[in-house]
């Protein structure tokens, strides 16, 4: 299988935090992806067993090959992490693990493959499902939602200021030309909907926020995150570490507020008030890490 690189983010910081753990035996990587973090953890901590989850079958196949040298210390399961507690119960005899890691968002495997439709830089079908067995694709949303619903999701999940102009342009295009089939077509509609001056002011790619919104809705990313964090509490031992890396403000807000509420309720203690950010050298070597924020809760 072709080697696909996905440089894991904030790995040293995660290892340093877990090194403080008194008894690290069972670790869950809730987003094992291409196995980058898992590889680093299994190499650094020779006594651990790791349960890796991902909803993307292709990612799991790659992780499986990469983590083969660790033999029976690794178990990989295709599952949405919202069911993390059930997966732990079914696969580890113990129901209380020592650490759980969430590295949210998409992997380079998903972004770089134009057939998956995640990238506004690559022409492909408008798909965006992380779990290819899921029923709803971004194509269904783009071609069926009304102006109000499109505008609402672009605003809510993409924080897109020009959500209504873009939604109107999409529906107008559908009425005149029929179905919108490719990411390139969608990007072009967004470009045409926004005056050149506004596009210049946006700084980043004009389709970035719409693509983020679609991805979040197709995969119910925020709903899965809320459930996944909550259900993690049910399978983490007292003193265990819940470690989350987020990449945009909507995700980070959920992590930050959940942790704050749980600290108030005496369920856990926040490891550091401010999120841990990648150092300049890491960002230079891996631009994807630029927006990463690491937060940790230690269960009481
Ligand atoms: C940023 S990548 C993880 C990369 C991984 N840490 C590594 O080092 O290779 C995020 C992964 O999480 C998976 N994912 C996202 N949301 C998920 C969910 N709700 N349930 C299970 N997997 C999910 C994606 O399919 C993707 O493979």
Image (cartoon, helix red, strand yellow):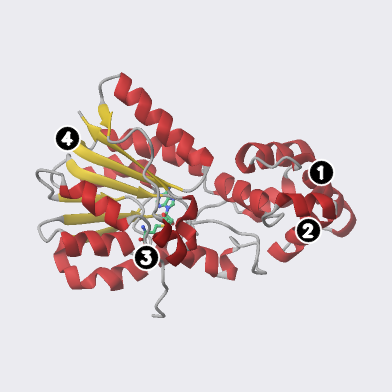
Q: Name the residue under label 3.
A: 34
Who comes first in sequence, dot 3 or dot 1?
Answer: 3
Q: Nearer the viewer, mark 2 or mark 1?
A: 1
Dot 2 lies on which element?
A: loop
Mark 4 — residue?
239
Q: Is residue 107 left or right of residue 15?
A: right
Judge whether residue 48 can be spotted in this image: yes
Q: Name the foreground residue: 61 vs 19.
A: 19
Q: Earlier in the sequence, mark 1 or mark 4?
A: 1
Above or below: residue 237 compared with residue 46: above
Which of the two discs, 2 and 1, labels the residue nearer the N terminus?
1
* Disc 3: residue Cβ within 8 A of ligand 1's nearest atom: yes
Contact between marks 4 and 2 (CB within 8 A): the answer is no
The residue depicted at 32 percent of the width and 54 percent of the height is 53
**Label 1: which secondary element:** helix
Q: Position of residue 284 (x, y in %)?
A: 46, 64
State the SS at label 3.
loop
| CA distance separating discs 3 and 2 | 34 Å
Residue 168 at what x, y percent from top left?
A: 83, 44
Which callout, 3 or 2, points to the residue nearer the camera?
Answer: 3
Left/right placement of residue 215 relative to residue 123 reads: left
Which residue lies under the disc numbered 1? 165
Instruction: Identify which residue, 295 or 140, lies in the foreground.
Output: 295
Residue 91, can we see it? no
The span from disc 3 to disc 1 (Cα, nearest Å) is 38 Å
Q: How far apart are marks 4 and 3 (CA)?
A: 28 Å
Badge 2 vs badge 1, beta-carbon distance below 8 Å: no
For the point 45% across and 59% down, which residue is it? 283
Crowdedness of circle 4 by 10 Å Cα count: few (<14), some, many (20+)?
Answer: some
Q: Quadrant of the C terminus?
A: top left
Residue 187 lies, in percent from the top left, at 74, 60
């Amino acid at each position: 299988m072709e080697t696909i690189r996905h440089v894991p983010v904030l790995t040293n910081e995660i290892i340093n935090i877990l090194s403080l753990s008194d008894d690290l035996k069972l670790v869950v990587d809730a987003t094992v992806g291409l196995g980058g973090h898992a590889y680093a953890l299994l190499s650094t901590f020779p006594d651990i067993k790791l349960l890796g989850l991902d909803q993307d079958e292709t990612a799991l196949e790659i992780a499986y090959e990469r983590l083969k040298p660790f033999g029976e210390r690794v178990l990989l399961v295709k599952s949405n992490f919202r069911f993390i507690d059930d997966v732990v119960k079914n696969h580890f005899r113990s129901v209380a693990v020592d650490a759980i890691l969430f590295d949210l968002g998409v992997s380079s495997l998903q972004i770089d493959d134009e057939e998956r439709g995640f990238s506004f830089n690559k022409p492909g079908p408008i798909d965006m499902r992380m779990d290819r067995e899921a029923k709803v694709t971004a194509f269904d949303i783009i071609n069926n939602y009304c102006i109000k619903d499109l505008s609402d999701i672009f605003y809510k999940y993409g924080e897109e200021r020009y959500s209504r102009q873009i939604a109107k342009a999409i529906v107008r295009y559908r009425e005149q030309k029929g179905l919108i089939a490719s990411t390139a077509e969608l990007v072009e509609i967004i470009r045409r909907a926004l005056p050149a001056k506004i596009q210049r002011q946006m700084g980043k790619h004009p389709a970035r926020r719409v693509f983020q919104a679609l991805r979040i809705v197709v995969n119910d990313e925020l709903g899965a995150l809320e459930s996944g964090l909550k259900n993690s509490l049910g399978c983490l031992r007292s003193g265990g570490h819940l470690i989350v890396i987020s990449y945009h403000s909507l995700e980070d807000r959920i992590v930050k507020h959940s942790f704050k509420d749980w600290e108030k309720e005496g369920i856990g203690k926040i490891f550091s008030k401010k999120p841990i950010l990648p150092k300049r050298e890491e960002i230079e070597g891996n631009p994807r890490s630029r927006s990463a924020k690491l937060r940790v809760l230690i269960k009481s």
